[in-house]
Amino acid sequence: MLAKILLLLFFYTSTGICQTPQLSASLHGTFVDAENGQSIPEVLVRVSAEKIEQVYPDRDFAHATATDAEGTLSLTIPNEPETYYAFSLMALHPEYQSKLLRQEMSPGKNRYDLGEIALKRTLSLQGNVSGGMEVQGCIVNLKMHDKSADFFRAAAPVEHAAKTDTTGNFNFSDLYPIEYTLTVSQNGAIIAFVDAIHPQEQPYISIRLPKLKTLHGTVVDTEARPIAAARIYATRHRETPSGHNALLASAASDDMGTFQMQVLEAEAQYLSLEVSKRGYFSRVYQNVVIEEKPLTVPLEKGMTVKGHVILPEDIDPEAHYTVKVFPADTQMEPSLNPLVLHKPLLARHFPATASTFTVDGLFSGVYILYIVGDGISATAINVAASPNSEAVSIIADRPTSTLQAHVRWADTDEPVHNAIVSRSWYPWELNPSDLSMTLDRFEVETDTDGNFKFDNLTEKPYQLYIRAVHAEFETATNRYQRTRIHKQVEIPIPGTAYRIYLGKRDGTSFTKQ
């Protein structure tokens, strides 16, 4: 353990991020066991010094040390009074639950005594798997429930896995006092499922393997002809809102369209079946009842769109372009609202050297098709999907543009650094799998001179949402008063450098530089 901590310390110090600055503060404290009060040696302590004008709290935790044999902490962090205003401390130890502390800093203070910091031990879970022909070598998996309010998700491992021994016993350590979903798998298939288990309340669990059921059927097209090589997935759904679904088993249809798999028995409301094949519409069966008679799964063949594309001449031959398909009535307006996601129905990727493309699996009808890619300005065309559609031609040889600007305080004409700038996005920039939490790729931070830029844009109007922190020192409280400044700006077209002003006397949205 000591060797691992020393290795971590070597990494941090060798990169130069732990060097002591001229103005610094020292942190002192002692880590003790929450149950018996004994000191805890070899606790890895990582600290982040948070900047005054930073919108998001700094979570780099760039400064690190380890407690000594008496559990004592001693660490020096930067403390320039006009730069830093708080620090966050993360304590990590393999036998204890991680702990996060945060404290604001005073400009004239260079020593912080944190006193005794109590850590709680991690939990263990023991169990036994029985009832099967062979219980040795089963994989037992624990997955933390999706509870956003759980503090422990910040540092605790999300998943744990263990193997059963010759008698079916297994053991987990380093667990936290929250709920987990437990599964037991053998030969790639799940043979036992426990929706929720709490190691603090249930330190031991006995699992008797149920008998598996045979799920079988035939995949056919709309004319009852067998479909080979279709993929079939059986899913066991969660019972609690924060639990997890589990893929029980999968199979492929043979030349006669038939399939068969051994599936863990579950109530119909928790079992679903998904059947898919490229070029066909996927089908999901909910509330599946496993019966002796086989299922008949019809799949409908999708329509096809073919195209011929002309790309920019200087595009990298190793690059790719993407064909994105939208319903004909999709609103193609830009949005800053993370809940407004007009995502494409599907996206297909092709190498830049391929001048022709085929998109299948569509319903009959009219669609908006977009060609996008690095260095390729988004280009649209209306297409009709049909059984015997002819190839459409689309010229997508316009280059992309750059949106760049300089942000300054209107009151002082000083540059605004560490401001967060979010830009609006168009539906063609999204992917079918996009969630609102993935949209941080449309966000940048201004540098020390207040500059920022977004590359690879289409020449269209964009909206900007700028968030900055204005800090003023109050002598009465001997601390900085932080005020968040928000501003939204409409940029008519990229390709030109702009100057944007923030502040109380701000009467101008932006000007060209």
Image: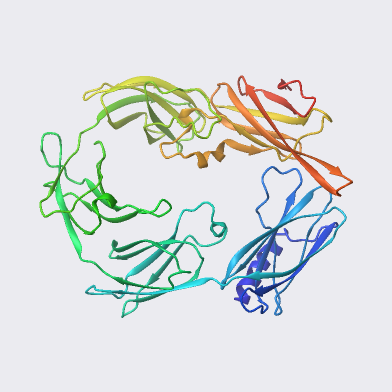
Q: Which residue is drawn at 55% across and 28% down?
A: 457
Q: Can residue 207 be seen in this view?
A: yes
Residue 308 location in percent, x, y?
35, 24
| For residue 43, side relative to residue 231 (left or right) | right
Quadrant housing the C terminus: top right
Colour scheme: rainbow
- Name which residue lies at 63% across and 76% down: 2
Looking at the image, residue 508 lies above or below residue 420: above
- Extreme-right residue of the structure: 475
Residue 324, quarter of picture: top left
Q: Which of 199 and 211 is in front in this view?
A: 199
Query: In the rendered image, is residue 74 in sight?
Result: no
Q: Return the x and y of residue 60 as percentages of the image width and height.
A: 66, 54
Residue 48, compared with residue 199, is above or below; it is above
Q: Which of 157 and 454 is in front in this view?
A: 157
Q: Is residue 119 left or right of residue 270?
A: right
Where residue 69 sits, quadrant-wise, is: bottom right
Q: Specify whether 406 is left or right of 444.
A: right
Taking 24 as reference, is 138 above or below it? below
Q: Where is residue 510 in the image (x, y as percent from the top left)?
A: 71, 22
Quadrant position of the N terminus in the picture:
bottom right
Q: Position of residue 48 (x, y in %)?
A: 70, 56
